[in-house]
Image (cartoon, coloured by chain):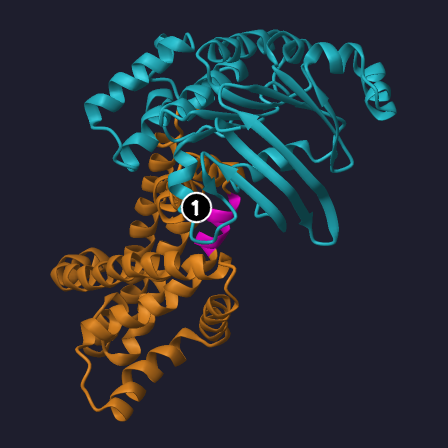
Chain colours: A cyan, B orange
Amino acid sequence: MANNKIVVKNLIKSFGKLEVLKDISTEIAEGEVVVIIGPSGSGKSTFLRCLNRLEEINGGTIIVDGYNLTDKKADINKIRRNIGMVFQHFNLFPHKTAKENIMLAPLTLKTMSKQEAEKKADELLRQVGLSDKADAYPAQLSGGQKQRVAIARSLAMNPDIMLFDEPTSALDPEMVGEVLSVMKDLVKTGMTMVVVTHEIGFAREVGDRILFMDGGYIVEEGTPDKLLNNPCEPRTIDFLAKVL
Amino acid sequence: MKFFDLFIKYFPSYMSAMKITLWVTAASLLIATLIGVVFAIFKISKFRILKSIANVYISIIRGTPLIVQILFIYFGFPMVFGFKWDWMVASVVIMSINAGAYMTELIRGGIEAVDKGQMEAARSLGLSYGQAMIKIILPQAFRIMLPSMINQFIVTLKDTSLLSVIAVRELVQNTKIIVANNMEAFIMYAMVGIYYWVVVSVLSSIAKMIERRTSYGK
């Protein structure tokens, strides 16, 4: 397929002697929304973190946007500009305001002028519904607001791939909705998204494809309808029985 | 009152000695901070050689008395390398090397106290390791370290008194010279103690003020 954004072949990743990813292969098309589910310790977050090389891999290849991430000569900093990432614990910069958090990358990397960056930040804050919080420091924001700023921040470099690492897992239940709704808006823009989550409802609603991971393997994958309603693998059936 | 008379009489000479003490302390701390940042990054790097260089440096400085370091650098170096120290330069060099070792540990501690998600978030945006360090990690590390840095400033300030062994006319040397003339050991050493105490107290309250000002809405 010519329009594959991410191609992963035979990916292997270990922490010391513990092999957490055992031969993972998959392809993600442009504009596709892939949701990864699975029990804790299944390797799903590690897999996501390999996609922008926050984890160094031990074997296999990962090609993102035509760039081979495993190539030692690849300019990883440049490739990462194109891949936004949202973390479970937000990781906002506490010494910067919401707006400064968003403007930091474009200004540091000199991809925008000060004016352009401000305009972009205002636009993004509006997009996530936080225009009134531009000058607030992270400590003054609720969990849901922090995560929405974090999403805005990762969009500031105009990435065309977004990775979400359990974006709602650290939130109080009443704040999950506001973050998911921002993510749903993002789906509508045609963004290529890879989302690790426990929100099965979100997976069903917006996922083009769901990967079920367990024990370092992709055990089963398919459309939400197929995987959630008619899973074939016993481990998938077992997992879904527990979470649904 | 005798104390007061002596205070007035020697005030100008103490002011010039104070200037030397503060200058040496401030310049040394500034250089020590730079040394500290570099060696702290050595210490947390994955390269064994850099780690070892930093460890040897810290171990030598921590394992020997400051007075030995002063005598060794001031008298030893010129013998081997054939040059003459300017006393001010020597003072700053010695105190920088000494405080640099302690600053390395402080800064390393500060960097490691910053949540590692901060580095990941910065790198995921496309910042290089250096950019992430400068823009994201170090500002937060310094904020965490501020109280211990002020403490180091106070320690170094008091340590400059040992420079009197190489006849640098800082506060203590100034007092020794005065006492040699007027024999008022009790009053004069009490006076120099008070000078130190006042400066240290002022520094401590400045530290508290800065700490309050940089709390970022917390």
- What chain is tagged by disc 1? B
Nearest the eye: B174 or B98: B98
The residue furthest front is A1
The residue range painted magenta reads B106-113
In this figure, what is the number of numbered marks? 1
**Would you say residue B182 is visible in this rendering?**
no
Q: Is-magenta flag for residue B42?
A: no
Question: Magenta span: helix, strand or loop, mainly?
Answer: helix
Q: Is B44 left or right of B19, judged from the image as shown?
A: right
Q: What crowding class fits label 1: few (fewer than 14 Cα within 10 Å), some (14-19), or many (20 or more)?
A: many
Question: Residue B5: where, in percent of width, then height?
Answer: 16, 58
User: Element type at marker 1?
Assistant: helix
Q: Amino acid at mark 1?
A: Met
Residue drawn at point x = 53 percent, y = 14 percent? A144
The answer to whether B109 is drawn above or below residue A29 in the figure is below
Can you say which quadrant of the picture contains the C terminus of chain A? Answer: top right
